[in-house]
Amino acid sequence: MEHLDLPPMLGARGTVRLPGSKSISNRTLLLAALAEGETSIRDLLASDDTERMLEALQTLGVSFSRDHEACTCVVQGVGGGFPVKAGDLFLGNAGTAFRPLTAALALSGGNYRLHGVARMHERPIGDLVDGLRQIGADVRYEANEGYPPLVIGPGEIALSGPIRVRGDVSSQFLTALLMALPLTGREATVEVVGELISKPYIAITLELMARFGVVVKREQWSRFTIPGGVRYRSPGTIFVEGDASSASYFLAAGAIGGGPVRVEGVGRASIQGDVAFVDALARLGARIEAGDNWMQARAPEGGRLKAFDLDLNHIPDAAMTLAVAALFADGPCRLRNIASWRVKETDRISAMATELRKVGAEVEEGADYLRVTPPKVLRFASIDTYDDHRIAMCFSLVALGGMRVRINDPACVNKTFPEYFDRYAQVTAPVPVVAIDGPSASGKGTVAARVAEALGYHYLDSGSLYRLVALAAMRAGVPLDDEGRVAREAARLDVRFEGARVWLSGEDVTDLIREEICSVGASRVAALPAVRDALLDRQRDFRRAPGLVAEGRDIGSVIFPDASPKFFLTASVEVRAERRYKQLMEKGLPAKLESLSKDLAERDARDAARTVAPLKKLPDAVLLETSDSGVEEAVAFVLNEVGRAPG
Ligand SMILES: Nc1ncnc2c1ncn2[C@@H]1O[C@H](COP(=O)(O)OP(=O)(O)OP(=O)(O)O)[C@@H](O)[C@H]1O
Ligand SMILES: Nc1ccn([C@H]2C[C@H](O)[C@@H](COP(=O)(O)O)O2)c(=O)n1
């Protein structure tokens, strides 16, 4: 499966222009299609869910033109029911297209089939179908009672008493009925049975219907009346607000990662309920500022978010972001009244619990709540995303805890926010890595250690890991060409680094791994792909704040391809042999210059010729040739490139 590795982040800061709201985009598209006249929709969201709606409208005979760059769509309204009276519509996993189209088509007097991806066929729609059948609509289930696919015929629509619809599973059923009923041209009343959830989404529906000329009379949140004789009329031009749910990831990033992170396109004047996310974030101690069209978050005064216990029924989507923010709180957190999560893109309560546990949280899962106890230290995890865009986006925040995280199937964000990870990268600062690759005895280790010290960064001598593997394998009697067994030794290497000293299974082997037998052994095991794989994560774990200087052969190419700057440090074989000779002599170890020179040349050749991660200068690496210069000059050169004056 495709995945995206996010490095640990130092913090978050910056400004993000948000994409258009999904809820507003799909409602506006449908209303513009049903309205009389031409509607120019500005800042329309371009995503999978809006594509599904547009494809459906096209199939149903609605014409529109798009300017992708300007995010504008001009829709020619059909002024009532859809002109095409038969069609097969695939709506993917777009609930905001499926539910309202079901209602509008049930009142359009044609024959239609509506279906989607497998998960869409597991998401209940029975309450909406029951509501539509009360007024004579012909809506049938193709397979399972209560679930899509649906088959719609021309019903005998008769409005007598109020239509009763349940509001406690999804508010989208009520939205669908409200948006479709003006097609009848008659007065219609809808009564909500049970407590209506996600009320702010109904508020969006009513506001947009009003902009298209249909004002609904609302009594509390339980009775809604659409006047008779009304028709949708285009408002001319309509602007789509930035997506308030998408804003939640960036605002949380500001609250967790220092900030300020500012989102533009949505603010206090928004019609979206999810702007209330900032109020929840403020309860966690985050410092919030907001204007009509922007919001901004910074970390709490004390730096740490406060534990919380919140009813989140009114912001079900943005609430997922709080579940991840809970990882950074100063105590156990409770997210209450979130039962609707169970019928979303996936069972979000179960999925979030599973993934939060992977990063080390203790999680209690109830029918309609989650209790999250943050871990003392976050763990690296490979996050499964369940084809759910919001899981992918909110778990990207884990990286702000200084822990790298892997997001599986990152393209699932295309549902609502195709550019999410690019925007995330714009406001986050990865823990920096300086990569120094080069051949044996070129001076990488000496220079890297000195640079790390000057910068106050961590230091990784990756070659020592291959030396340790060779030593461990030899001690275990494993032939160095037995890839599987050597890789197993690599995977279970019990190693500890402390300053310049290295321990293997509790024994100080600092000098031992520098001996010739380990040098040659390391070069051999380093050519085995399974061994390199086994050491990959171990090396990446060295990337910790405030930064890392890493040296080896494939640091810039494989281990940290995003390292910056990258260096290729080298010297002629003769010079390197002399340096190694001197080094060994100083340690009182036996050596012959000639054989050292021959051996270095052989190791260079082996390291450069192997198929996996060969030693080579990368195009984006700075060449540092040290045959004629000393250590001080090399260190100064690197520090200068890093942007830090030596001394
Ligand atoms: N520019 C330089 N001029 C002179 N001596 C140097 C220079 N750079 C490093 N040395 C010396 O060369 C010797 C080998 O350096 P070092 O061990 O750092 O190389 P290395 O590339 O890390 O080797 P290996 O890959 O085998 O671990 C050390 O004694 C070091 O002090
Ligand atoms: N990233 C790395 C580091 C080292 N190796 C190989 C190359 C050498 O033959 C051996 C020992 O490395 P040294 O201590 O001399 O730097 O390990 C590698 O393939 N990739």
Image (tube, rainbow, N blue to C red):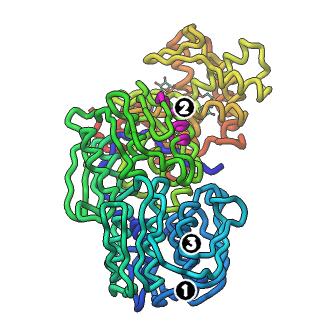
Residue under the point 64% across and 28% down? 597
Specify few, some or many for label 1: CA neighbours under 10 Å numbering under 14, 14-19, or 20 or more.
many
Cα separation between marks 3 and 1: 12 Å
Ligand 2 occupies quarter:
top right
Q: Secondary structure at mark 2?
A: helix
Q: Which segment did they paint magenta?
A: 350-363
Q: Give yes or no for residue 357 being in the magenta stretch.
A: yes
Q: Position of residue 577 (x, y in %)?
A: 58, 27
Q: Give yes or no for residue 369 being in the magenta stretch.
A: no
Q: Nearer the viewer, residue 321 or 501?
A: 321
Q: Main secondary structure of the magenta part?
A: helix
Q: Position of residue 276 (x, y in %)?
A: 29, 53
- Answer whether residue 572 is visible to the viewer in this image: no
Cα separation between marks 3 and 2: 53 Å
- Answer whether residue 437 is visible to the viewer in this image: yes
**Residue type, mark 2 in image:** Gln
Queried on whether the Cβ of the residue with tag 2 lies below 8 angstroms from ligand 2, the answer reads yes
Residue that mark 3 sits on:
102
Up-down: is 469 above or below 76? above
Residue under the point 40% across and 69% down? 24
Residue that mark 1 sits on:
82
Residue mark closest to the camera, 1 vs 2: 1
Residue under the point 52% across and 88% down? 63
Residue that mark 2 sits on:
539
**Residue type, mark 1 in image:** Phe
User: Which callout, 3 or 1, points at the residue further toward the start of the chain?
Assistant: 1
Quadrant, the C terminus: top left
